[in-house]
């Protein structure tokens, strides 16, 4: 058992209350560390540290800010194994997945925005009489970054990096459910010599530490990734304070499989799009829509492939599926499976908790689950489950596929599987979602706009979008 600490003003310290929250290992169900139960007093300390650091950091040459960030990126890379093991232990995901995806991407986030700092530029507009307008892009000041538990260090750094690159000082809170890599990251920031107060990491729950960030009058922008209900709550506090808001929220993504797809590849890739990270990725496709003429063939091949996914100890390289992040989340997923049965769905595979035995006997594992026989309007096909559960539905033609894909309150990321470029191109612009993948899934170029339409969010992250979000545009007009 060890205690994590907050990172405030360059120092590691306990919460002012001296209280701690339990941190669990999902694979065993046991408590293994404690995190500071921070609240408004700790957020005040972090804001004070950020205020003191701001003039130096904002006034530093972009190249030097970038150099600090590149040092952090390099240390994350050097600590790949340690961070991957910590991420797996905290979240339940397989170690191999954290090694291949989460931690390299965290390093890449800092490298990408560290170099972007130097290349960021703004516009100039010349007028007919020779007057010239130029745009200054000034850092917002002190900003708040709040991230979820599913891709802990990956999403935490995805927010912090553009904020720092543009000269802001940050008060950040990782999810209380997966705090460890953020704590290890704060140690690496100290080792990298990041100036004290530039980044402050405060641990605690949403009600205590999270809401204190959102409501703090000196924190001028909030970048949040999490559930739609939490996003709504955050907006209700931040909007009347006129804070800038970036909200990356839930999804209920469609995977659209057409009869002219590359069949074998589509089956393989759509299994990954359904169950990667135990289905706990906001981008996972949870509603698979299949063209009628290949429905049975696809269903049988898909189910056979899903049954090959080994559920087991996240430490084992052979485990394709690890544990779900918490007991409460596992229960939520099992409740949705029960609901799907009540709504008339047929469970084709999975549908139950798994007990892998050994040290994982009490862990929170659920078998990858495939359901058919439900229409688009039922709750199972409308609400976000955020676990290893997908449904299969068939469609007759493109119009029906589009209508079904667009039928939920969400609009985050859809994928389409067809060999017809013409068809895919035509359909993409009819889909109400922020990201469309064609014959690929989770292929990320960090320069592209990232985010959702409808209740999946407000604003976009990624590339210049994120750099603009974390800056205030000021127009300066010089008369002729
Ligand atoms: P939550 O909304 O429960 O929590 C997200 C973060 O917000 C956590 O750090 C949480 O703290 C904090 N929080 C909770 N309540 C408040 C509050 N009142 N004020 C401020 N902060 C608060 O989401 P989950 O962690 O459960 O993550 C899963 C959700 O995230 C899913 O809906 C998923 O779709 C979405 N998501 C969206 C992505 C996107 O890019 N669109 C990417 C990844 C996930 P704590 O955990 O300590 O309570």
Image: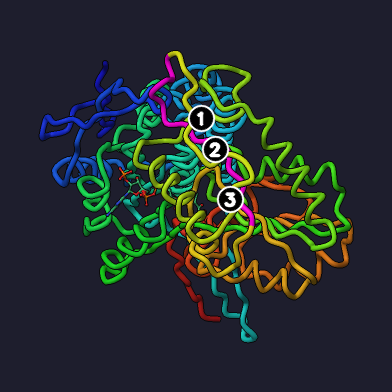
The outermost residue toward the bottom is 129
- Disc 2 under 8 Å from ligand 1? The reply is no
Q: Secondary structure at mark 1?
A: loop
- Asked if residue 198 can be seen in this view, the reply is no
321 relative to 467, above or below: above
- Disc 3 under 8 Å from ligand 1? The reply is yes
Q: Which mark is residue 278?
A: 2
> Which of the 4 image quarters holds residue 375?
bottom right
Q: What is the spatial separation of the Cα atoms under label 3 and label 2, in whole angstroms? A: 12 Å
Residue 385 coordinates in the image, percent (x, y): 48, 52
Dot 1 and dot 2 residues touching (CB under 8 Å) = yes
Question: Where is the C terminus found, in terms of image quarters?
Answer: bottom right
Q: Secondary structure at mark 3?
A: loop
474 relative to 359, above or below: below
Q: Give the left or right position of residue 119, taking residue 361 as reference.
A: right
Identity of the residue drawn at 61% across and 28% down? 320
Give the magenta range: 359-372
Q: Secondary structure at mark 2?
A: helix
Residue 85 coordinates in the image, percent (x, y): 48, 20
Q: Which mark is residue 93?
A: 1
- Disc 1 under 8 Å from ligand 1? The reply is no
Label 1 Cα neighbours within 10 Å, binned few <14 / some 14-19 / many ≥20: many
Q: What is the spatial separation of the Cα atoms under label 1 and label 2, in whole angstroms? A: 7 Å
Q: Which residue is mark 3?
A: 283
Label 2 Cα neighbours within 10 Å, binned few <14 / some 14-19 / many ≥20: many
Is 323 part of what is drawn in magenta?
no
Q: Give the left or right position of residue 191, taking residue 35 as reference.
A: right
């Amino acid at each position: 058992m060890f205690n994590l600490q907050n990172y405030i003003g360059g120092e590691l310290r306990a919460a002012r209350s001296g209280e701690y929250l339990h941190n669990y290992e999902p694979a065993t169900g046991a408590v293994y560390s404690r995190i500071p139960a921070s609240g408004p007093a700790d957020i005040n300390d972090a804001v004070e540290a950020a205020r003191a650091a701001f003039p130096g950091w904002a006034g530093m040459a972009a190249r030097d800010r970038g150099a600090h960030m590149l040092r952090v990126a390099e240390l994350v890379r050097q600590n790949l194994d340690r961070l991957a093991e910590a991420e797996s232990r905290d979240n339940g995901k397989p170690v191999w997945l954290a090694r291949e995806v989460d931690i390299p991407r965290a390093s890449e986030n800092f490298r990408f925005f560290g170099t972007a700092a130097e290349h960021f530029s703004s516009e100039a507009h010349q007028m007919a009489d020779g007057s010239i307008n130029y745009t200054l892009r000034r850092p917002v000041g002190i900003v708040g970054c709040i991230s979820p538990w599913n891709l802990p260090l990956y999403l935490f750094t995805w927010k912090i990096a553009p904020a720092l690159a543009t000269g802001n000082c940050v008060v950040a809170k990782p999810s209380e459910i997966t705090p460890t890599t953020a704590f290890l990251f704060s140690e690496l920031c100290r080792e990298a010599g990041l100036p004290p107060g530039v980044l402050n990491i405060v641990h605690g729950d949403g009600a205590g530490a999270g809401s204190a960030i959102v409501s703090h009058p000196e924190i001028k922008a909030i970048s949040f990734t999490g559930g739609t209900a939490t996003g709504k709550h955050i907006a209700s506090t931040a909007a009347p304070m006129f804070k800038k808001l970036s909200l990356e929220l839930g999804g209920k993504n469609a995977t659209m499989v057409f009869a002219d797809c590359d069949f074998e590849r589509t089956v393989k890739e759509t299994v990954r799009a359904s169950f990667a990270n135990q289905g706990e990725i906001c981008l996972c496709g949870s509603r698979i829509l299949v063209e009628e003429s290949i429905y049975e063939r696809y269903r049988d091949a898909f189910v056979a492939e899903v049954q090959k996914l080994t559920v087991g100890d996240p430490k084992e390289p052979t485990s394709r599926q690890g544990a779900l992040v918490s007991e409460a989340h596992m229960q939520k997923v099992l409740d949705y499976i029960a609901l799907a049965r009540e709504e008339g769905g047929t469970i084709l595979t999975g549908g139950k908790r798994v007990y892998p035995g050994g040290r994982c006997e009490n862990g929170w594992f659920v078998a990858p689950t495939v359901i058919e026989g439900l229409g688009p309007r039922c709750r199972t096909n409308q609400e976000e489950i955020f676990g290893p559960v997908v449904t299969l539905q068939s469609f007759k033609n493109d119009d029906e596929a589009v209508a079904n894909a667009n039928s939920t309150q969400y609009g985050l990321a859809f994928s389409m599987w067809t060999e017809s470029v013409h068809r895919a191109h035509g359909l993409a612009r009819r889909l109400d979602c922020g990201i469309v993948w064609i014959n690929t899934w989770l292929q990320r170029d960090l320069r592209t706009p990232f985010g959702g339409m409808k209740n999946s969010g407000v604003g976009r992250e990624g590339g210049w979008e994120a750099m603009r979000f974390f800056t205030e545009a000021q127009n300066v007009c010089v008369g002729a």
